[in-house]
Image (cartoon, rainbow, N blue to C red):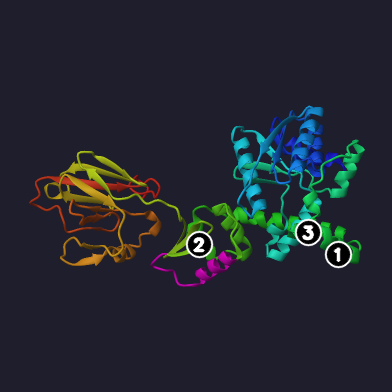
Amino acid sequence: MNIELCRKFFASRRNYTVFAGFSGGADSTAALLTALHFQKEYDLHIVAIHFNHHLRGTESDGDALWCRLFAEKHGIEYREINLHFSGTTAIEDAARQARLQHWTNLAADKKMCSVMLGHHADDRMENFFLRLLRGSNLSGLLSPKAEYNLNGIDIFRPLLNFSRKDIEKFLLLQGIDDWRIDSTNAQNDCSRNVLRNMILPQLFKLFPGAAGGVKQSLKVLAQDADFIEGCAAEKFDKNLVKTRIYWQNLHPALMVRILRLWTGEIPTADFITRFQQELTLLPPSEVRKIPYGKDFICFQNTSVYRESAAMAVPEEVIWHLDSPEYVWGDWLFVAESTSDCRVSSKFEAVFDAEKLGDYLLIAPPCPGERMTIFGTTRTEKLKKLRIDSKIPAHYNLPVVKNAAGIIVWAPGIKHSALAAAGKNSRKLLKISAKSAKFGIGFGVN
C-alpha cells in the first residue's frame, strides 16, 4: 500500500477538520494512520469518531475501548457515539441512517470539514456484484465513490484503490497486528457475507486472475461513468426540467442521472419505466402523478413538476378587510381602494366594496365547487375553469368567498358575478393575489 497515492485527498482539504470513521477494523485503522501521516503537512484537525452500536455485547464495548486507547496513543482526538436499536428488523439500514444523521450534525457546526471512511477495493468489488444482481446502472455498480457530497457532507475514501490484503500488510509494517475483527462477518446470514466468504473465493479459484480482471474493469468503467455523469451535469437545466419536451429529447442514460440531480434522490427502475411511458402519451389536461419516494412527479399539459405528498395546504381563513394585506400559504393578498375598474391580469379583481362586506374567506378549492361567471347567470365547475385556463396544479391557487361561503373570485381564473363593480358602484376595492414563489404579481409574471 503506497500511502503517497492518498496525498491528493488531503492536499485538497488543507486546514480542514477531518472526521474519521473509526471502527477499529483494519481498513478504518489504516485510513486513520494515513490521515495522521499528512496531518502536519496540510494542517489537518483529525477527529476519530467511533460508533458503538451495542449489537455484539462485550465485543462492541471491547472495540470501543481499543479505539479509544489507540487514539490516545497516537495523540488523536477521540469521540464515541452510542447508538441503540430496538424493535427493528432492518438493523443495517437503521444503523446507516443513524450514522448519517450524526455525520450531518457534526458537519453542521463547521464550514471546512470532511468525513473520511475506510472503504477499500474489496468493498467496491463486493458492491459491484451485489448491485449487478439488483439491476443497477453503471454509476450504481461503481459505488462507493472516492469523493462525493451527500446531504451537504463532503465524504472521501482514500483507500479505494487498495485491497484488504494491501491494507493488512501496511498495518503489519507499522507494527500493528491486533486490529479489531467483527465476528459477525464470518456468519453467512446476509448477502454480502455469502458473497465475500463463499461465492467470490470460489469464483476466483475457478478463474485464476479474475480478481485482477474485475479490478481493471471497475477502473475503466469508472472512467465511462464519469464521462456520462459529466454529460448529465452539462445537460441539466433547472428551468427546462419543468418542461415535457426536455425529457422527451433526453437519452435514457442521461434521464436517470438528471432526475437524481433535479430531485436529489435516485429513481427506482419501476419509476423510470412509468416516467418514460408517461412521456409517450398525449399531454394530459388534468394532473397525472407518479409516486417518487415520499413525493410525486406530476404531469399537466406541457409541464413537469415535483409535488410533496406532505405539502400542507392552508385551511380556510377569515380576512378582515380593515387589514390591507393577508398571507395565505405562498400567496399574499392585498386590498386597496381604487377609482378604476380596470385590471392588468386575472390575479387582480375589482369589487363593489359595499356589496363585498367587511370580511372575506380565503380557502383551498373543494371538489365539485362551482361559481357564477361574471357577466352571465350560468355556473361552471371550478375544476373545468382551471383546466381551460391552463393553470398548473402545483400553484395551489386559493379561492375568495364572501361571508356566506360563495365564491366571488378565483385568482388567475375568473371573477364571479357577485359583488361585481359597476357604473353605479360608489366605492371600489381592488384585490391582488401575489406569489413570489410562482413569480406572480411582482413584475415577473
Where is residue 433 shown, x and y percent of the image?
Answer: 29, 48
Q: Amino acid at mark 2?
A: Pro
- Separation of marks 3 and 2 at Cα, in angstroms: 35 Å
Residue at x-position 82% and y-position 45%: 181
User: What is the quadrant of residue 392 in the picture?
Assistant: bottom left
User: From what the image shows, is residue 49 above or below residue 226?
Assistant: above
- Mark 1 belongs to which amino acid? Leu
At 90% across and 66% down in the image, what residue appears?
A: 206
Q: Is residue 145 visible?
A: yes
**How many other residues sit within 10 Å of disc 3, few (<14), some (14-19) or many (≥20)?**
some
Percent across and percent down for residue 12 are 72, 37
Disc marking residue 291: 2
* Residue placed under numbered mark 1 in the picture: 203
For label 2, count other residues whose C-alpha is less than 10 Å away and answer few (under 14), some (14-19) or many (20+).
some
Single out the mark in the foreground, 3 or 2.
3
Q: Which residues are magenta?
A: 270-287
Look at mark 3 in the image and give the residue it sits on.
188
Q: Nearer the viewer, mark 1 or mark 3?
A: 3
